[in-house]
């Protein structure tokens, strides 16, 4: 039986790729890896990526969601609040994009998810440190010193 070792990418359905790239670009700093015609766009996230597919065919998400890891969750919250997007004032940071994709934003420092040192360095995030609780969670699972 194969063991799960990570997620290569998440694919989001959006109506219009240009609009989606502009919308997400208001809140997140990212590199566009490339595009395939008007159908697909690829956003690099270090050693992972998000694929955006034009032509959403399903209703808005409810409980189904995915989480994005950022270096500063509160900066995203402030930007969304300034843009008039209804997000909580503190705590969990969840939103639905204009195409109905439910997204949760989490701070890298506060969760067990970790990137290799070389990947962080390549992303310009080599000074990003885990919180004590996140480090303990990693140690408890035998994933850190």
Image (spheres, helix red, strand yellow):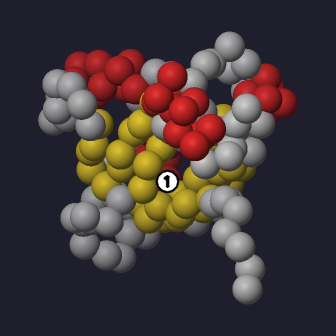
Residue 93 sits in quarter: top left
**Above or below: residue 65 compared with residue 34:** below
Q: In this view, does 145 lie to the left or right of 95?
A: right
Q: In this view, does 23 lie above or below 109?
A: below
Where residue 105 appears, as percent x and y from the top left, is 39, 39
Q: Is residue 15 visible?
A: yes
| Position of residue 47 in the picture relative to residue 26 (left or right) | right
Residue farthest toward the bottom in the current orientation of the protein: 1
Q: Does the rendering let one see residue 85?
A: no
SS under mark 1? helix
Residue 6 locus on image (x, y percent): 66, 59
Q: Residue furthest top?
A: 127
The residue sitting at 57% across, 24% down in the picture is: 130
Q: Quadrant of the N terminus?
A: bottom right
Left or right, 56 with respect to 31, comes to left
Identify the residue at image location x=63%, y=60%.
7
* 133 or 71, nearer to the observer: 133
In the image, 120 versus 86, the foreground residue is: 120
The residue beneath circle 1 is: 17
């Amino acid at each position: 039986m194969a063991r799960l070792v990570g997620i290569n990418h998440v694919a989001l359905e959006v109506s219009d790729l240009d609009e989606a790239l502009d919308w997400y670009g208001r809140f997140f700093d990212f590199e566009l890896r490339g595009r395939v015609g008007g159908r697909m766009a690829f956003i690099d996230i270090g050693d992972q990526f998000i694929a955006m597919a034009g032509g959403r065919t399903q209703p808005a998400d409810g409980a189904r969601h995915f989480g994005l890891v950022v270096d500063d969750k509160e900066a995203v919250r402030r930007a969304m609040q300034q843009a008039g997007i209804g997000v909580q004032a503190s705590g969990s940071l969840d939103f639905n994009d204009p195409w109905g994709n439910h997204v949760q934003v989490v701070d890298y420092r506060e969760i067990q998810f970790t990137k290799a040192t070389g990947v962080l360095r390549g992303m310009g995030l080599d000074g990003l440190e885990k919180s004590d609780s996140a480090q303990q969670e990693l140690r408890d699972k035998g994933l850190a010193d």
